[in-house]
Structure formats: structure tokens, C-alpha cells
Image: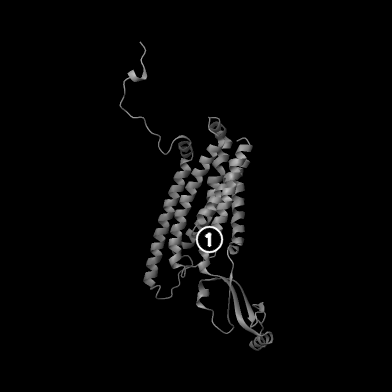
Amino acid sequence: MSTTLADRPRTGKPARKPGLLHGLTWLVVRQHRTALWLIGAATLLGAAMIVYRRGEMVSMLDRLGWPGKDVDLPNNPEGFQYVSGALGGLPVILGVFLGAPLIAGDQEHGTAQLVTTQSVPRRRWLAVKLIGCLSVVLVSTAVLGALFTWWWEPYREVLPAEWMQGEIFDATGPMPAALSLFLTTCGIAIGMVLRRTLPAMTVTFFFSVAVELAWGEFRDRLATPRLFTYPLDADSPAFLDQAVEHDRWIGTADGQLFGWGTCAEQTERATNACIKEHGIVNNVVEYFGYDQMPGMQWTGAGLLLGGTAVVAVFILWWATRRPL
């Protein structure tokens, strides 16, 4: 006699509900678990180092009586420049070692063809890979960038680098995350086009270095510099100590400007005669104020995130036009 489902004994164990990691998500996490562990460990180590080094520097400043007294810190106070340099290089490292092999490795070893023939649409598979990879990059770099900003910002007056230098500007606020997301996504695109891991990593490295150099030249275009005029024989105003000087002139009362070295004569008498001849009475400074830094960083981050979105769309478009 046949039995129905209703006649079969029940075990009493409820069916398991799928957890957060299942299907493609589980596959991607398992496939890249080594990279995830390394990024997580590096993030924790970097965070611990920043907290420790900042504590050492604060203790030293307290012993020296800052801010009540002027202090001269060494050129590399408790590893500050090492940490800022490491953060500056982090976007390149992520682009080369995480982005470039992400799809190229699967193409090279046939994993991409295997996965996309198992009733999984290639666009969905790519979307899961992209979202997972970029989420890890975002969390890691946002944490490190926030901690480094916490270290630098209250003590910027006594630390060696000015705020518009790359080692500060690109390592604080939203910039580490924005640069890392852009270069990682570009690395993924390069790897998918080249289809080989080692060539993709090599090209990504040189591309990332070129982007970093170009970004350094573009940084001062993220805001409009300000002009400030003060008498020729007066001291420089205090607020310019925290500003970044972009250019400087000497000028007449009616606004005519001359180059800073126009009256740099060999003798004081000749210099005074030159100043009198040209009617020069003012110093004119073109500068970026420290209060412009957040706006410049968010403008730059917006441009980089826009570029990240464009490259991500290209990756999905390319996957639908070319075989993996």
C-alpha cells in the first residue's frame, strides 16, 4: 500500500532557514576567504597601531606642556609619517592585490565559466562579487581613515605635514575610502579585460601610480583659492599659518600686481627705489584656508565615487558583450 507525505513520520526538526551567507554569497566569501582574513587582520592591526601611536604622542605633548608652550616635535613623531605613508599606498595595494585578480583569476582558472553555466546569470554573479569586494574595501578604509583623522586633526599645528599634502589630504576624511574604491574597481575592470592575473596586476599597478600622480596635480583644483592683501611692511596675519599658500605677489594701491621677486635688488637702497618707482605698497597672497579642506575632500570623493560607478557599469556591460 502506498503512503502519502501526510502518512510519513515527522522528525520534529524544523527546516533550516538560509542564513546570511548562502548561495552565491557563500560561494564568493568561501572563494576569497584568505583575502578577507588578511584585510580584516590588516585593518585591526592598523587601527591598533594608530590608537597606540596617538596615545604615545599625546603623552609626549602633555609632558612638554602643549598647548600652553610651543613645542618642536621630531620629523616623524612616533611613526606618524610611516602610518600616513601606508594609508597613502593602501588604495594601490587594494587595486593590485584585490581588484586585479578578482575576476581575472576566475577567468584564468575556468571558475567563471563553471559558475555561469550552473544556471547563474553572469550579471548576478558579477554583481555579488563587486558588492562583496567593494563593501570590504569601504569598511576597512573608512575605519582606518576615521582613526587617522582622529589622530591628526586635533594636533595638526604641531605635526610635520601641512593639510594639503597628499600624505594628509588623501589619508583623512572620506579620501582613503574614495580612492580605494576607485582603484579597486579599475583593477577589477583591467583584470576582466586582460583575463590573466599577473598582467592585470602589473597594468593595475602602473595605472594606479599614474592616477595617484595625476590626483596630486589635480588636488588644488578642488576649490577656488582666496586672495588676501596686507601692507608691505606689516607682519603676516596669524590665520595664514594654517593656510596653504598657492601664490604670492606684491602690488600697488590700485590693484596692479608684480611678481614676488620684482624688486629683489642686491642692495636695500636699490630695493626701496624699485618699490617707490612702481608704487608698491601691499603684499598679496593667494591661499587655501583650512576651513576649505572638508569641502575639497568631499568634492574629490564625489568625483572618485562617480568614476567608481562608471567603471562598475562598464564591468557589467562588458560581461554581457564578451564571453567570460
Residue type beneath disc 1: Gln
Callout 1: 10 Å neighbours few (<14), some, many (20+)?
many
Residue at 57% over, 32% down: 113
Quarter of the image that includes the C terminus: top right
Q: Position of residue 247 (x, y in %)?
A: 61, 72
Q: Position of residue 242 (x, y in %)?
A: 51, 71
Question: Dot 1: what SS?
Answer: helix
Q: Which residue lies at the image location 47% right of the left edge and 59% below the top edge?
A: 83
Q: Which quadrant would residue 223 be assigned to in this image?
A: bottom right
Relative vertical location of residue 287 with respect to residue 100 in this rendering, above or below: below
Quarter the N terminus occupies: top left
Residue in the image at 45% along x and 64% along y:
152
Q: Answer with left or right where residue 246 lies relative to residue 144.
A: right
Give x and y (percent) for residue 235. Answer: 54, 82
Counting labels gives 1
Does residue 162 appear in this view?
A: no
Colour scheme of the rendered structure: one colour
In the rendered image, the residue lying farthest to the right is 277
* Image x and y of residue 90, in percent: 51, 53
Q: Is residue 141 visible?
A: yes
Which of the two residues, 98 or 77, is positioned nearer the viewer here?
A: 98
Q: Residue at x 54, y 54 (%)?
A: 179
| Pointer 1 residue | 297
